[in-house]
Image (cartoon, grey):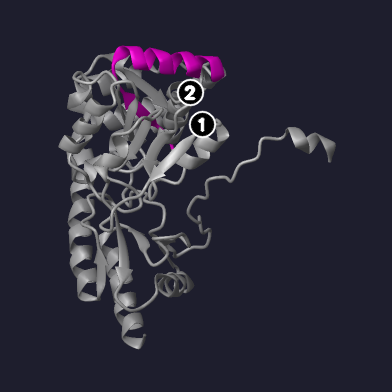
Amino acid sequence: MSWEKNMRTVDPYVAGEQPKQAGVIKLNTNECPYPPSPMVRKAAEDFDCEKLRLYPDMNAEKLVNALAGYCHVKPEQIFVGVGSDDVLAMAFMTFFNGDKPILFPDITYSFYDVWADVFRIPFRTCPLDEDFCIRKEDYLVPNGGIVIPNPNAPTGVLEATAMFEEILQANPDSVVIIDEAYIDFGGESMLPLIEKYDNLMVVQTFSKSRAMAGIRIGFAIANEKLIRYLKDVKFSFNSYTMNMPSIEMGTAAVLDDAYFKEIVGKIVATREWTKEQLRELGFTFADSKSNFIFATHKSVPARDIFLALKENNIYVRYWNKPRIDNYLRITIGTDEQMQKLITFLKTYLKEH
């Protein structure tokens, strides 16, 4: 058809499967296995639906102020969006407009190259080493911007803050985005360095450690000038992205710090137990500091294990991609879910 010549075509991001049948153990999308804070439930129950006839606060001040207090920054240093995907997409659109390629790892969150393609941003992927670690020297070259998750996904590897400082110091003319979607499960955040580096932006999400993937809240923290640029683009695109219920429930989640720490602690404890069990079964993996484990077995192909698990209603994530096609990403569920996973693997691996 003649009109198709004007279409913008891209290879889209492919999310993990969302099985609909009952009884599934869903360990493939890094969701939290526990419910949100009871304060979130109360905020939902108390919400006045009559207000939905009005536009929400375009600045989401209630949520922003709660985050500012929690993170010890000014409200002017915070940008909120509809999940960290929205925040990161806006950041790509805002900051990555030069002629030089932006840089990110070759094994990483697979939305980065999609956004680069959509926004026509030149990019170059930097190979991780054999242990799936960042090679610092790859980011000490001319570039149009840098984005790196820490811990990385899907590997779960956590890099030292000192390494990122070296990258920041070597790139004063580039915006460096550290995507901290999984930082709460065992890492040291870069947030304290926001005041030191005016080209640093840290992005976090409510989807993992705050058990709110379904409400879609993400945020960025940076110096005030970077946030102003980001807001200018957002308000030119869609001023009212954060809806009223999200603002109320997100604020409640931030205020219930005790519950947040409780469920993170549970997930970390279950992760460490699962590591021990997987090692005994012949799996190897990097020392994950996230809410998942990226594992390969010594003799049984990952794809075979993936299909066998799926046939038994246990879903994990598998990619048929170079360098990682013999790995499974296993989200940490409840103790009961992980016990069922291990029990199945013990039987299956004995037979194979």
**CA separation in Å, label 2 and label 1:** 7 Å
Q: Magenta region's main secondary structure? A: helix
**Residue 31's spot in the image, x, y percent?**
37, 49
In the rendered image, which residue does mark 2 sit on? 97
State the residue at coordinates (31%, 13%).
224
Whether 231 is among the magenta residues is yes
In the rendered image, which residue does mark 1 sit on? 121
Which quadrant: the N terminus?
A: top right
State the residue at coordinates (55%, 19%).
237
Residue 302 falls in image quadrant? bottom left
Find the magenta span and give its range.
215-237
Whether 240 is among the magenta residues is no
**Residue 126's spot in the image, x, y percent?**
36, 45
Comparing 183 with 143, the one in front is 143
- Mark 1 element type: loop
Q: Callout 2 environment at 10 Å: few (<14), some (14 to 19), or many (20+)?
A: some
348 shown above or below 72 = below
**Residue 47's spot in the image, x, y percent?**
42, 26
Q: Callout 1 environment at 10 Å: few (<14), some (14 to 19), or many (20+)?
A: many
Tell me whether the residue at label 2 lies in contact with that at label 1, contact meaning CB atoms closer than 8 angstroms: yes
